[in-house]
Amino acid sequence: MNYLDRADEVYEERRDEAWMNINIIQLDKYKANLTVTRERLGNDYHINVFSYETLVATGLEGGKLMQSQWHSTTTQKHVNYVAKELNMELIKLF
């Protein structure tokens, strides 16, 4: 088996692993402290919002973005911004 055939085989073995199903969404503001990921789970895409590397909100793409607790004013700005940019309804569970 040559090198390229082996690489194809390894790719097929690992194709469905979670790390290959996560994309980072690039937004225009708050680039230093805001990370938004889009993760494929089955047929759905889940949005995860990280502010200062802490998961602060999550939801289904195009649906509702859930925030389970109160955060600082800056973090709240991050969550509000993501909800607006991704056209998601923000639901505060606190």
Image (cartoon, rainbow, N blue to C red):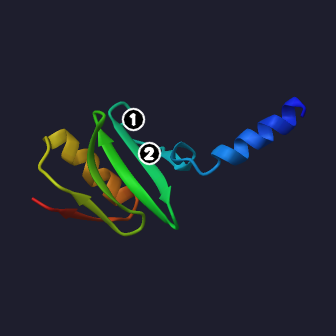
Compare residues 76 and 47 and report the one nearer the observer.
Answer: 47
> In the rendered image, which quarter contains the N terminus?
top right
Residue that badge 2 annotates: 27
Which residue position is annotated with label 1? Answer: 31
Crowdedness of circle 2 by 10 Å Cα count: few (<14), some, many (20+)? some
Name the residue at 11% across, 49% down: 70
Name the residue rendered at 21%, 42% in the picture: 75
- The quarter of the rendered structure image containing the C terminus is bottom left
The x, y position of residue 25, in whole percent, is 48, 47
Q: Position of residue 9 (x, y in %)?
A: 77, 42
Left or right? Give the position of 76 relative to 81: left
How would you rate the neighbour count of disc 1 (Cα within 10 Å): few for under 14, some for 14-19, many for 20 or more? few
Closest to the observer: 28 or 9? 9
Badge 1 amino acid: Lys
Q: Is residue 20 left or right of residue 94?
A: right
Q: Residue furthest right?
A: 2
Q: Is residue 24 shown above or below 65? A: above
Point out residue 63 in the picture as x, y percentages from the top left corner: 36, 69
- Contact, mark 2 vs mark 1 (Cβ under 8 Å): yes
Question: Considering the numbered disc 2 on the image, is that residue within a helix, a strand or a loop?
Answer: loop
Q: CA distance from mark 2 to mark 1?
A: 7 Å
Residue 24, how many percent across, how many down?
A: 48, 44
